[in-house]
Image (cartoon, rainbow, N blue to C red):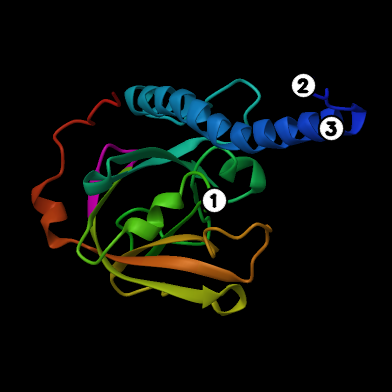
Amino acid sequence: MRRRRPGRAGLLLLAGGLIFCLAGAWIPVKAELAQILLALAWQESLDLGRPVRPWPWADIRPVARLRVPRLGRDMIVLSGQSGAALAFGPGMHEQGAGPGGQGTCILAGHRDTSFRFLRRLRRGDLVLLDDGRGRRWRYRVESTTVRRAEDLWFSRGPGAGLALVTCYPFDALRPGTRHRFVVLCRLDPATFRHRPARPERVR
């Protein structure tokens, strides 16, 4: 019995499916590749004492390093929360506090790339945030919550906090959802006993 060859319509459907698959896979691959260049720029920024662009035409710069030891997450945080910045990694909100500062340091990332791991965080998890001066700030996860985007606001003080924000739900097919998944962290007093004597190099 002879097998029927796929017609033009079948080939077009197959090609279209492959294109969509490749396009979907390119987004996380691009984010991972960018983090390699960003890690190099971050290390050079620490060595020189000034921000270094990850590539010559970049309008973003690395401003912090975020780590979650329990989940093995290690990534470079970028300045601002523009679409161009978030395509390569989490971004630091310019109106929030700086790492360890009074108020809330706000980091945002995409739910399907850099901040997909937020759904796995739990109360008490350690979150490390290194700033551009080589200081390491230790935070502990206090809570996770879902809020409407228009109801999202954070304290400016007193006390030092950290908010990790991404779109919700995580598995939504459409962009621009109306809700946000928020992880709230509080500065750990142990921060002041565990500051590194010199910046730890990115591996």
Judge the density around disc 3: few (<14), some (14-19), many (≥20) Cα neighbours within 10 Å. few
Residue farthest to the left?
Answer: 193
On the picture, is 131 further left or further right than 38? left
On whether residue 104 falls in the magenta region, the answer is no
On the picture, is 103 further left or further right than 193? right
Depth order, front residue of 143/102: 143
Which residue in the protein does label 2 denote?
A: 1
Residue beneath the point at 57% across and 71% down = 179
Which residue in the protein does label 1 denote?
A: 110
Marks 3 and 1: in contact by CB < 8 Å?
no
Question: Is residue 33 among the parts visible in the rendering?
Answer: yes
SS class, disc 1: loop
Whole-percent x, y for residue 84 in the image: 65, 41
Query: What distance separates the C-alpha of mark 3 from that of mark 2?
Result: 21 Å
Disc 3 residue type (three-letter): Gly
Residue beneath the point at 60% across and 34% down = 25
Q: Which span of residues is magenta-colored? A: 131-138
Residue farthest to the bottom?
Answer: 151
Of the image marks 1 and 3, the number of the one nearer the N terminus? 3
Residue beneath the point at 11% across and 46% down = 194
Query: What distance separates the C-alpha of mark 1 from that of mark 3?
Result: 34 Å
Disc 2 residue type (three-letter): Met
Depth order, front residue of 5/177: 5
In which image quadrant can residue 177 be found? bottom right
Which residue in the protein does label 3 denote?
A: 10
